[in-house]
Image: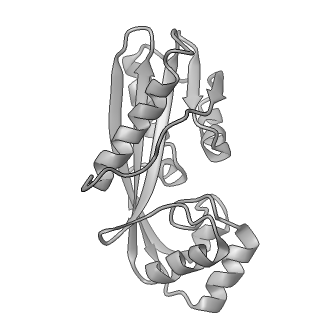
Amino acid sequence: MLPLLLASSSPYRRELLERLRLPFIWASPDVDERRLDDEPATELVRRLARQKAQALAVSYPDHLIIGSDQVAVLGEQILGKPHTFERACEQLLEASGQQVTFLTGLALLNSATGQCQVDCVPFTVTMRELDRARVERYVEAERPLDCAGSFKAEGLGVSLFKSTHGCDATSLIGLPLIRLVDMLKVEGVAVP
């Protein structure tokens, strides 16, 4: 089996990948994550996942490289990482009572052969009705400033949900493990 490399500095993705009990290393790719003009959100995350894996292929020539990228979509608007307290509060108030779809791009690149599998895994969250005081308490408590959509589904953020719908809950956190296991199988990797 070729060694696994996670092309991400995200601690959330590392924690998820550890669930598969496969040895891996990680490195942070240098990729411009800006959206192209008129690029659909699905294509954006697919492209960025592929680019993140490809960005490390020269430095890791005999690896299976996992790239992933995620955006949250509210209506036609892409919600990125808020980075500030105020923007996180704004995003959550905009999402109050609405459906937010998380699109997670996933790529598995065999850097020895150049074969690259790419997919996009959607997951939808219906948010509870939220008021400013509740939102501020949440953002203060969990500081989800580096999370698309401004909440951490693996933590207290789940209290903001009314319901969820999707085939892989791990995609909500940023690395769809069910789909990844399928991709690894194509490369001859058996997950215990």
Q: 189 or 36, which lies in front?
A: 36
Rendering quarter of residue 9 = top right
Q: 44 or 186, which lies in front?
A: 44
Residue drawn 43% across and 83% down? 97
Residue 191 drawn at (x, y percent): 53, 23
Residue drawn 36% across and 19% down? 186
In the image, taking residue 83 as reference, residue 185 lies left or right, namely: left
Q: 70 or 85, which lies in front?
A: 85
- Say if residue 137 shows up in the picture: yes
Residue 142 drawn at (x, y percent): 71, 68
In the image, taking residue 100 as reference, residue 43 lies left or right, namely: left
Residue that lies at the very extreme toward the right in this rendered image: 141
Q: Is residue 32 above or below residue 180?
A: below
Residue drawn 40% across and 69% down? 100
In the image, taking residue 116 as reference, residue 11 lies left or right, namely: right
Rendering quarter of residue 141 = bottom right
